[in-house]
Image (cartoon, helix red, strand yellow):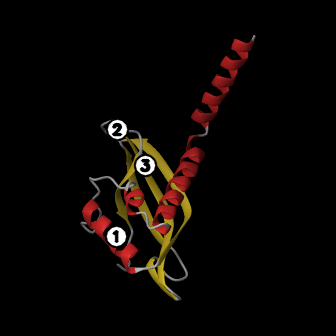
Amino acid sequence: MKKLLVFGLIILALAYIFFSGGKNDDEYFINYFHEMVRAGEEKNLDKFMDNFSHHYQDEHGFNYIVVKNIVKNVFEKYEKTEGIVSELSSSVSKNEDGRETAVVNMGVKATASNGSIETVILGLKETPENVTVYLEKSTLGSWQIVRVEGIDRAVY
């Protein structure tokens, strides 16, 4: 009887995971980007950059090394950094190679300050920047950012 109950619970859990796909994806990526914001606020360069693929290449021609240097310079230049992620929606699929990919659209605002002087790094004072982030699941199973689109104005 216990085995049947355990088996039934496993089936219910798998059915829940299978049929609630999109909601869980959004929730996962909300947590993913909140952790990334936290790493930025802690000025933890390694933890922040762990989210980027070494094959990163964006619409401005920036690669992993360029992004790392920009982030490092911001961390060194400012005493405090803060970020906000809002209005996130995601879509997960598989590419031609069978690797999982994700497209996440969200609002992002990043500020930095020295004392009472605040600088908007990304976004505008009143509104976040609408960005699209492309991710791929690595062979080790973690999601990594491979491209970002929509960053029109950023202060480095």
In terms of depth relative to the viewer, which is nearer, 130 or 139?
A: 139
* Pointer 1 local density, CA inside 10 Å: few below 14, some 14–19, many at least 20: some
> How far from the left and from the top, in percent, is residue 69?
29, 69
Q: Quadrant of the C terminus?
A: bottom left
Per the model, the C-alpha gap separating discs 2 and 1 is 27 Å
Amino acid type assigned to the residue bearing label 1 in the image: Lys
Q: Which mark is residue 72?
A: 1
Verify CB contact (< 8 Å) between mark 3 and mark 1.
no
| Of pointers 2 and 1, the one earlier in the residue sequence | 1
Q: Quadrant of the N terminus?
A: top right
- Whether residue 63 is visible, yes or no, is no
For the point 38% across and 63% down, the residue is: 45
* Pointer 2 local density, CA inside 10 Å: few below 14, some 14–19, many at least 20: few
> How far from the left and from the top, in percent, is residue 20?
61, 39
- In the picture of the structure, the residue carrying the numbered disc 2 is 139
Label 1: element kind: helix
Verify CB contact (< 8 Å) between mark 2 and mark 1.
no
Mark 2 against mark 1, which lies toward the viewer? 1
Amino acid type assigned to the residue bearing label 3 in the image: Ala
Label 2: element kind: loop
| Farthest right residue in view | 1
> How far from the left and from the top, in percent, is residue 131?
44, 66
User: Does 145 appear above or below 121?
Assistant: above
User: Is residue 66 shown left or right of residue 132?
Assistant: left
Image quadrant assignment for residue 138: top left
> How far from the left and from the top, in percent, is residue 9?
69, 24
For the point 60% across and 47% down, the residue is: 23
- In the picture of the structure, the residue carrying the numbered disc 3 is 102
Amino acid type assigned to the residue bearing label 2 in the image: Thr
